[in-house]
Image (tube, grey):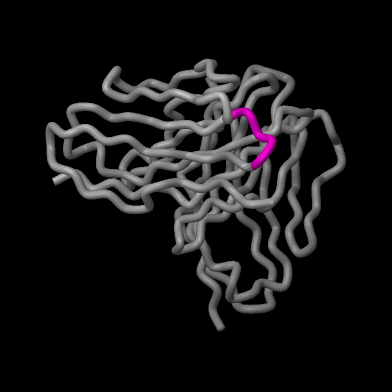
């Protein structure tokens, strides 16, 4: 089975712009979660989607949003980018079951100038 | 709220030796899962091992095993016969049953000395 894929892998934007990141889960996985990883804050949960519905949201401003499509692919959007949004954005998918193990994609590295 | 603490920012071990990485967590819930993930320089987060809190038996995966002490809320990772490819950041994480939000520790950077 193919793993979780994320596009693009690298991105450079300037302050004030917006960005959209994409994540395709492992085939059959319907839950997709997003995390932000920075040197200062570590790994932080952004949100989780299941069946096109956001089920969980972390403590991030409204500039961070996401959605999930009927094929379970997910996108996250960051509007009005700030320098502090520079980070590695990781997407993970899981197959709902007894042990909710999340499998991660390679991440999108975003640099905001 | 859950918290996960990794008190060792860096560890090093001689190749072929054994090393133990520490992790403590705090939760008021009784049903949860614990994980160790490995993040090599490629930044890809790779699952190493998982443990269901309701299982008393410690999980093992080849050279990797855990020491799960539920009462002490401790979840350490033991790597036996360390290999150069084990060099990475190791993150301990927890998730509550019925939830998908992983809470991560701050990580331990493991260096393997040839």
Q: Please name whichever residue, A58 or A13, is drawn nearer the observer in this view of the structure.
A: A13
The image shows residue B79 at horizontal and vertical percentages of 69, 63
The image shows residue A91 at horizontal and vertical percentages of 49, 39
B106 lies above or below B31? below
Residue at 58% over, 39% down: A25
A80 lies above or below A5? above
In this view, the residue farthest toward the front is A70
The image shows residue A71 at horizontal and vertical percentages of 58, 30
Q: Please name whichever residue, B78 or B63, is drawn nearer the observer in this view of the structure.
A: B63
Residue at 62% over, 21% down: B99
Residue at 38% over, 30% down: A76
Relative to residue A28, is residue A73 drawn left or right? left
Count numbered badges in the picture: 0
In this view, the residue farthest toward the bottom is B114
Relative to residue A36, is residue B70 drawn left or right? right
Relative to residue B19, is residue B62 drawn left or right? right
Q: Is residue A53 magenta?
A: no
Relative to residue A17, is residue A97 drawn left or right? right
The image shows residue B76 at horizontal and vertical percentages of 67, 48
B109 lies above or below A70? below
> Quarter of the image containing the C terminus of chain B?
bottom right
| Magenta stretch prevailing secondary structure | loop
Residue at 17% over, 39% down: A83
The residue segment tinted magenta is A27-31
């Amino acid at each position: 089975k193919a793993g979780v894929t994320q596009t693009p892998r690298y991105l450079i934007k300037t302050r004030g712009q917006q960005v959209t990141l994409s994540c395709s889960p492992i085939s059959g996985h319907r839950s997709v979660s997003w995390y932000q990883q920075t040197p200062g804050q570590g790994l932080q949960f952004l949100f989780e989607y299941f069946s096109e519905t956001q089920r969980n949201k972390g403590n991030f401003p409204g500039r961070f949003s996401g959605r999930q499509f009927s094929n379970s692919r997910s996108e996250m959007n960051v509007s009005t980018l700030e320098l502090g949004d520079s980070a590695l954005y990781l997407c993970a998918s899981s197959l709902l079951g007894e042990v909710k193990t999340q499998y991660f994609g390679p991440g999108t590295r975003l640099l905001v100038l | 709220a859950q918290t996960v603490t990794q008190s060792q920012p860096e560890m090093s071990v001689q190749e072929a030796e054994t090393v133990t990485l520490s992790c403590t967590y705090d939760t008021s819930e009784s049903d949860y899962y614990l994980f160790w993930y490995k993040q090599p320089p490629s930044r890809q987060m790779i699952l190493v091992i998982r443990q269901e809190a309701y299982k008393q038996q410690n999980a093992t995966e080849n050279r990797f095993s855990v020491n799960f002490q539920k009462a002490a809320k401790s979840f350490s990772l033991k790597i036996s016969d360390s290999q150069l490819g084990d060099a990475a950041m190791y993150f301990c994480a927890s998730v509550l049953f019925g939830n998908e939000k992983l809470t991560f520790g701050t990580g331990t950077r493991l260096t393997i000395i040839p």
